[in-house]
Amino acid sequence: MANTNKRAVDILNKDDLIVIGGAGGFIAGALTKYFHDQGFTRIRAIDKKPLPEWYQMTDGVESICMDLSIEENCIVACRGAKEVYNLAADMGGMGFIEKFRIECLRSILINTHMIEAANRAGAERFFFSSSACAYNVELQKDPNVRALKESDAYPAMAERGYGWEKLLSEMFCEEYWSERGMKTAIARFHNVYGPFGTWDGGREKAPAAICRKVIETKDSGKLEIDIWGSGVQTRSFMYIDDCVLGIDMIMHCDDLIATAINLGSNELIAINDLVTYTEEIGGVKLERTHDMDAPQGVAGRNSDNTFIKQVLGWEPDLPFKEGLKRTYDWIEQQYNDRKAGKRTVS
């Protein structure tokens, strides 16, 4: 398989319509800005959140408040689209995923309606944001887990709720290519983090949650931190800039049509080490407690990047400590802005 790294700018005209679902959220908001900054003039950004609650708003983009779990809305959203990126889903960190499985499963409605609407509208390419939660949980019981390769999703034993929705939606993408000839792309995200992400309120993921907790302890003077679980759980974390670049390359690689692929860092980080790194950035040392009843997810999960390097000659590569510092600085500014009564990303 030959290396190729074509992007939207190599294939599309600047006035082709790009539709992005979930654009009021973290990743899709960053993707919207990414395409806008490349000079694309017709971007339709959609999210069910009211516009004032979007994480990022990009000037010059058609931004619409609309619920994409409703079929009629998807038809409107995809009208005239050259490419459709579906990143809309009800999701969050492990606390949300374990507690609200029905909401996570209901996201199947979004992708089912969006891919059908995109196909009927004549869109040439459709992107689906899958997740490493689609992988067999039986392979993730050891913090020293071997990195997961794409074939490890089967035999299927996905994370309940969220993971099963992702796995089934992947099948839709495969069959729309097989039966109807629409080029589909499937990326399995591994823990995306960075500025303009959720950092408070229960949907935030581990890097943002730990950053916030360290900032709060510094502000209060109570130098303690509560960690969910033993802290030996391991994950890999991908910085947002790597993520949006990877989406672009995966979407426009014909060798990856209807083929699920890992999109994540292969730098394995223990939660205890995440806390240590964040303490170093914050210039504090905290007393640690461990809540063993809190949601913890699988014991370990990492991305095997053999396939993406083979096909694209590239993998997400921003060192975690560097991305964490950028994220910490942004969350600290958000925290201070909130204290000052200014509007912040939730």
Image (spheres, rainbow, N blue to C red):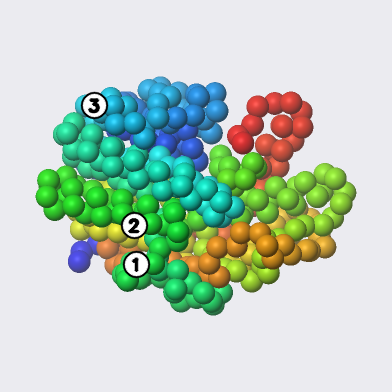
Answer with the quarter of the image where residue 206 lies.
Answer: bottom right
Which amino acid does the dot numbered 2 rest on? Leu
Residue 274 rendering spot, x and y as whole percentages: 65, 62
Residue for badge 3 = 79
User: Circle 2 — which element?
Assistant: helix
Asked if labels 1 and 3 touch by Cβ distance under 8 angstroms, the answer is no
Residue 24 rendering spot, x and y as whole percentages: 47, 33
Residue for badge 2 = 167
Left or right, 132 with respect to 99, comes to left
Q: Residues within 10 Å of mark 3 (few under 14, many from 20)?
A: some
Closer to the chain start, of discs 3 and 1, is 3
Which amino acid does the dot numbered 1 rest on? Ala
Asked if labels 1 and 2 touch by Cβ distance under 8 angstroms, the answer is yes
User: In this view of the protein, can residue 110 be seen by the observer?
Assistant: yes
**Distance between mark 3 and mark 1 Cα atoms:** 35 Å
Q: Which mark is residue 156?
A: 1
User: In this view of the protein, can residue 33 be seen by the observer?
Assistant: no
> The C terminus is located in which quarter?
top right
Closer to the chain start, of discs 2 and 3, is 3
User: Circle 1 — which element?
Assistant: loop
* In-front residue for pair 276/315: 276
